[in-house]
Image (cartoon, helix red, strand yellow):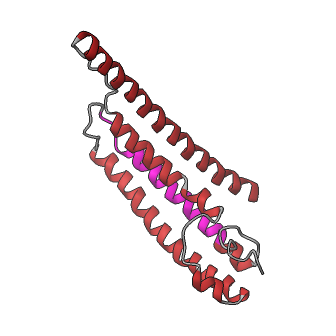
Amino acid sequence: MRRTLDGLYAGSGLVAALCLFVIFGLILLQVVANTIDFIAKLTTGTAYGLSIPSYTDFCGFFLVGASFLALASTFRAGGHIRVSLILQAIPLWARRWANVLCAVIALGLTLFMSWHAWELVRDSLDFGDVSGGLIPVKLWIPQAVMALGVTILGVAVCDSFLAGLLGKADPALDSLEGGE
C-alpha cells in the first residue's frame, strides 16, 4: 500500500511538472511567433499575424493542473508553509499530537474542497460550460484536474493523519522533528 500511495503522490507531482513544461513550450512558441512577426514587419513592412489561438487560456488551464496536482507531493515532502514557531517550542510528544490535530483540520478542509470541486465539475457537465477563448474548451476538463489534485491531497493528508495516529514516521508531519 505504501508503494502505491507514494507512486500516486510522485505521479501527480510528475504530471504537475509536465504541465509546467507545456506552459513553457506554449509561451516559447508564442514568443518565437511574435519575434518572427516583428522581424517580418521590420523587413517587409507587414507582419504575418502569427499566433497560437487561445494560448493564454491553455496556459491558465495547465497552470491549474500544475498547481493542484503538485499539492500532494509537496505536502508529503513537508514542503507546505506552516507556522513552526509554536511547534518548535513544544516537546516532541506534544508536537506529534499537534501535527495530528492539524492533519484532522486539513483533512476536513480538503474533503470539503474536494466535494465542492467535484460538484463544480458536475455542474459544468450539466450546463455544458465552455471557455470563452478562440478555441472553446469544455470547462469540466480543467476543473476535473483541479478536483483530482485536491482529492489526491486529501488522500495524502489522510495518509499522514493515520501515520500520526499510529506513531509512524511521516515526512509531512515530522519535518520539524529532525534535531530531537
Question: Is residue 150 shown above or below 139?
Answer: below
The overriding secondary structure of the stretch rendered in magenta is: helix
Q: State the residue lying farthest toward the top.
A: 44
The answer to whether 54 is drawn above or below residue 100 in the figure is above
Q: Is residue 36 left or right of residue 15?
A: left
Residue at 52% x, 59% y: name it: 151
Toward which corner of the image does residue 77 lie, by quadrant?
Answer: bottom right
Q: Position of 165 compared to 138: left or right?
A: right
| Figure quadrant of residue 37 | top left
Q: Inspect the magenta stretch and tell me whether residue 154 lies in it.
A: yes
Q: Looking at the picture, how far across and down is residue 115, in whole percent?
A: 43, 63
Residue at point 64% right, 66% down?
78
Which stretch did the figure color magenta? 136-160
Answer whether residue 5 is magenta in the image.
no
> Residue at left 71%, top 69%?
170
Q: Residue furthest front?
A: 42
Regarding residue 177, the answer to whether it shows in the image is yes
* Residue 136 position within the rendered picture, expressed as x and y whole percent measured from the top left: 29, 34
**Which is more toward the observer, 76 or 5?**
76
Q: Which residue is drawn at the image coordinates 64% and 74% (left, top)? A: 161
66 vs 176, nearest the viewer: 176
Give the answer, above or below, for where 33 lies relative to 99. above
The percent coordinates of residue 111 (x first, y second) are 49, 68
Relative to 41, does residue 90 appear above or below in the rendering? Answer: below
Q: Which quarter of the figure has residue 132?
A: top left
